[in-house]
Amino acid sequence: MNYLKAIVFLVVLGCSHGLSAQLGFCAGNSGSPIFTEDFGTGTTNGPALPAGTTTYTYVNGAPDDGSYTIASSTAGYFDWFNIQDHTPDDVSGKAFIVNASFTPGEFYKRTITGLCENTSYEFSSWLLNLHPRSGAGCPGNGIPINVKFEIWDSTDTNLLASGDTGDIVDNTSPEWGQYALLFTTVPGQTSVILKMINNSRGGCGNDLAIDDIVFRSCGDLITLSDTANETSIYACEDDGPVSATLNASPDFSIFSNHFYQCQESTDAINWIDIPGETTDMYTTPLVNSDTYYRVKVSEDLINISNDLCNVISEVFEIILVPTPNPPNSIGDIRICENIENGILTVRVPPGMLVNWYDAPTGGTLVASNTTSFTTDTAGTYYAEAVPTVANCPSDTSTAVTLEFYPLPVVMDEELFFCENTNITLESGVTGVTYEWNTGETTPNIAVSQPGTYTVEVTDPRGCSNIKTILLNQIDLPIIDEIFSQEYDILISTLNEGVFEYSLDGINFQDEARFSNIPGGFYTIYVRNDTSCGNVSVSYFHLVVPKFFTPNGDNINDVFKIDGIETTPDYEINLFDRYGKLLKSSSNAPMLWDGRYNNQDLPSGDYWYSIRIEGELFKGHVSLKR
């Protein structure tokens, strides 16, 4: 805290002008307050300060220039900030509210008694500029605060110390600032007079609040450490008793001389002097329980026994740390194996840390300084409690087990089904609950559409697994066209697939062409290569040759239409290139040898028209000689 005060002072110093070199905080160790003025508490103003404390006039409300009040709030006072007092944890705490007089001069005076001779002191007070920057009451900024602190002897004739705060200007928000002054009493001096003087004129601004005026002794900062330069010892209780040689090291920031008195305590509250231990070094006896040591230090031997005149070193602790109980487990962890990690947790009291091992003794450290251990490996782990202040582990460790439950076993599938049929999808697991992506909750479901189906199965322990079924539809063939190429029948489909073809519904082939098939009526069957059934269509296979060669070799010597005789009503007509009718037949087979009127016709193309039960077919045939 002393260093913090020094930082605050340096910040103030950097923002002030004309600051006396004597204004400053105790650079060493501040003692207990000898005098404190916090102006009391309450929601009503007052009471007025004792006679002789101030030359200003007390008012019960907003003070005008040259007046003051004692109040817990400045609400409604001109355009000032509405503030609370500075004293920490005060309820309706009051402050000294001052509206400076038009003439600079003294506005606070107080005699401080009970001081020690030949002792350095710190006087401090908290000040606040009540006027807001660019407030409505003053054009521009108000007159800044500037206060001089003075310490006089008890006769009010000798000035012992003085210092100025410098200008404390308006701010955008209320900010308390602490200011301090150091002085030293002379031999025989036990009281002084404190004065606060307004360095600025009154008027628009120079309005201030004052709180927490404190006098305390100021001495060196005393460090108490052992031969290892440690400022405390935390040892395991089982390793006791413990002893230490302590050395008191002042920083010489205040005192020129040092007188010592070692003290001992069992609770760090009630202290007793250790007889005869009046040097800067002390070797403790062997201790089996918590014991605390400190040193009182004064600059004058006469002040060593007066706690208002000396300062206290830092406390050296010898703490015997008991062996802790092992941690408390919150229970073994059993989780489904598809959960990535298990978290094992124990509880320990405050001030304990936990280390985890993979064996009850002599194991490998797997986690340190954590009450929770996360792992993806099943097994039993062991938690050990260790105090944070010393390596005194518990005699035993706490076993915590992580177990992974197996998931329901499922097998993904890819299935096929025939178009226009239903198929039953099976979960393949019993003793679980089911949730299909169709919304159904039965072990098996019937579907009629291809796609991806999933079922989440959950066992009684809450472990779930998901089965995925990819369902493919086997489409029936769609016959697009059947046509004849002389004695061959060709079949085409609108869709693709691995199809098989048949002319009798019994014997199937992979090829879509049937070769050397006599003309006539046929039923064409097409199916997929599975048992999804087939589609069929009736087809009349009319065999019309593309050419014939009437050369007498008995091979293809005549033009003959095969299969037409299987129809009850037909008519065939042959024409030359000029449309001359060469031969005709009705409901009877027609054989043409390439002659007309017993004359051989020349090679060339000849045209035919065939009518079968109202349907007309036209084409040409080549005659080759």
Image: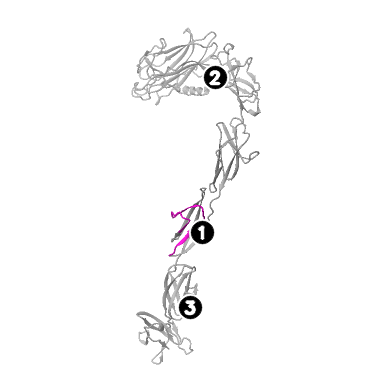
Rendered-image quadrant of the C terminus: bottom left
For the residues labelled 3 and 2, the Cα–Cα distance comes to 119 Å
| Mark 3, secondary structure of its residue | loop
Q: Position of residue 411 (x, y in %)?
A: 53, 56
What secondary structure predominates along the stretch shown in magenta?
A: loop
Along the line of sight, which residue is nearer the eye, 213 or 139? 213
Find disc 3 in the rendering and name its residue. 515
Marks 1 and 3: which is nearer the front? 1
Along the line of sight, which residue is nearer the eye, 331 or 473? 331
Q: Using the rendered image of the protein, determine whether residue 490 is visible from the camera's viewpoint.
A: yes
Which label belongs to residue 64? Answer: none
Along the line of sight, which residue is nearer the eye, 17 or 120? 120
Is 160 on the left or on the right of 574, as rendered?
right
Q: How many marks?
A: 3
Find disc 2 in the rendering and name its residue. 29
Going from N to C along the chain, the mark reached first, 3 or 2, is 2
State the image quarter where residue 61 is shown: top left
Identify residue type, mark 3: Ser
| Mark 1, secondary structure of its residue | strand
Identify residue type, mark 1: Glu
Report the span colored magenta.
420-445
State the image quarter where residue 391 is shown: top right
Identify residue type, mark 2: Asn
Compared to residue 190, the image places residue 461 above or below, namely below
Q: Position of residue 8 (x, y in %)?
A: 48, 23
The answer to whether the residue labelled 3 contacts the one labelled 2, judged by CB atoms less than 8 Å apart, is: no
Magenta highlight on residue 431: yes
Going from N to C along the chain, the mark reached first, 1 or 3, is 1
Q: Using the rendered image of the protein, determine whether residue 370 is visible from the camera's viewpoint.
A: no
For the residues labelled 1 and 3, the Cα–Cα distance comes to 42 Å
Marks 1 and 2: which is nearer the front? 1
Is 150 on the left or on the right of 392, as rendered?
left
